[in-house]
Image (cartoon, grey):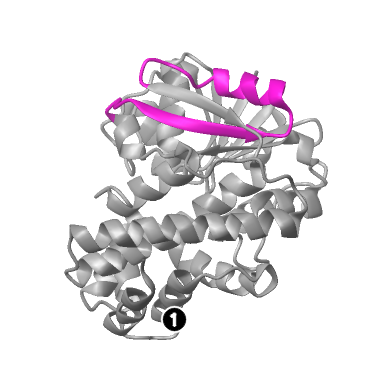
Amino acid sequence: MKIGIIGSGSWATAIVKILNDNKKTINWWIRSQSQIASIQKNKNNPKYLSSIIFNTKYLNLYEDLETVVKQSDVLICVIPSAYIEDALKQLPKDCFKNKKIVSAIKGIIPTTNVLLNEFLETEFAVSPQDYFTIMGPCHAEEIGIEKLSYLTFSGIQEIATKEIAAQFKNKYLNTIINNDVWGVQYSAVLKNIYALGAGIAHGLHYGDNFMSVYNANCAKELSTFLQKLYVYKKVKNIYNHNDSVYLGDLLVTCYSPYSRNREFGSLLGKGYSVRSAQLEMNMVAEGYNTSKCIFNLNKKIKADLPIIENIYQIVWNNMEPAKGFKNIEKMLQ
């Protein structure tokens, strides 16, 4: 199995580490030639998780994305959702024929308000049978120091999903399989919004007691949305939303100091403007764009999402964070 990695941020770097430790040869697309040169010379990514040392014997580094696509059977997309469309538009429309695409993206493409599988099917004729996902709960920083972690791999084709997952399993990473391609992606999208809200609450000096109630209500709201989503997408509702890819990912993203969405929200709660918070951070907080995407999508889904609606009003319509959380306080159970 020839594996290509599209992206070079912290999560992409963590995924490369897993495969590199498993002695899998990787074709890695990195936009910057200077970054490529640095990895080749120093055996680490100078911009992200620089403590990770690679065995470069198993790394083929390319500045040209089309070369990576041509030389790989399985392509793992690890670019923030806001930038994936721009990265892929340079490719020929038939470039993904006979390829398997794996999404490690926890966001929605903001220009079209669709998930990566919908974008690839429309723009590149990628079949749902050839589309898979990697979802958490899993922080790149803990992969970097080899803390025991779990990843869920989802796909319609069970055998192919297991084959892809098998490339990742090792002493510090366990793998789980399911086929809820729609649910795991939207769960990852929503948990980033809830984590942004958790950060706002932290910045407003709410305590652990409140946060426990907030997170419990987020979990319930998330499940409500997914139930409505399955009806809207006409897929079977056979999934346990207490599993780690749903509830576990929500909890770690809301509580962990590694969470970029929580960090972004905390800045807003402390009084930063959205723009100032963006400038303060070195990484993309997916919850910002996706709060607007979900708010608009929910006009069709019609789920009851009061927590997300108030977070959307805070980050997009300049509602005072304290006012938004006073609204949220009133509806928590």
For the image, the number of numbered tags is 1
Amino acid type of the residue that numbered disc 1 sits on in the rendered structure? Gln
Identify the residue position indicated by label 1 in the image: 313
In the image, residue 317 lies at what x, y percent? 44, 85
In the image, residue 236 lies at what x, y percent? 73, 44
Magenta residue check for 287:
no
Q: Is residue 92 visible?
A: yes
Magenta residue check for 151:
yes
Is residue 34 shown left or right of residue 90? left
Q: Is residue 281 visible?
A: no
In the image, residue 316 lies at what x, y percent? 45, 80
Is residue 196 shown left or right of residue 100? left
Q: Using a 10 Å C-alpha cutoff, classify the residue at mark 1 as few (fewer than 14 neighbours), some (14 to 19) or many (20 or more).
A: some
Residue displayed at 35% across by 36% down? 45
In the image, residue 294 lies at what x, y percent? 57, 67
- In the foreground, 239 or 50: 239
Is residue 27 shown left or right of residue 128? left
- In the foreground, 315 or 220: 220
Residue displayed at 54% across by 24% down? 26
Query: Which image quarter holds the N terminus?
Result: top right
Q: Secondary structure at mark 1?
A: helix
Q: Give above or below for 266 relative to 141.
A: below
Query: Which image quarter holds the C terminus?
Result: bottom left
Q: Where are the magenta residues, as a range?
A: 145-172
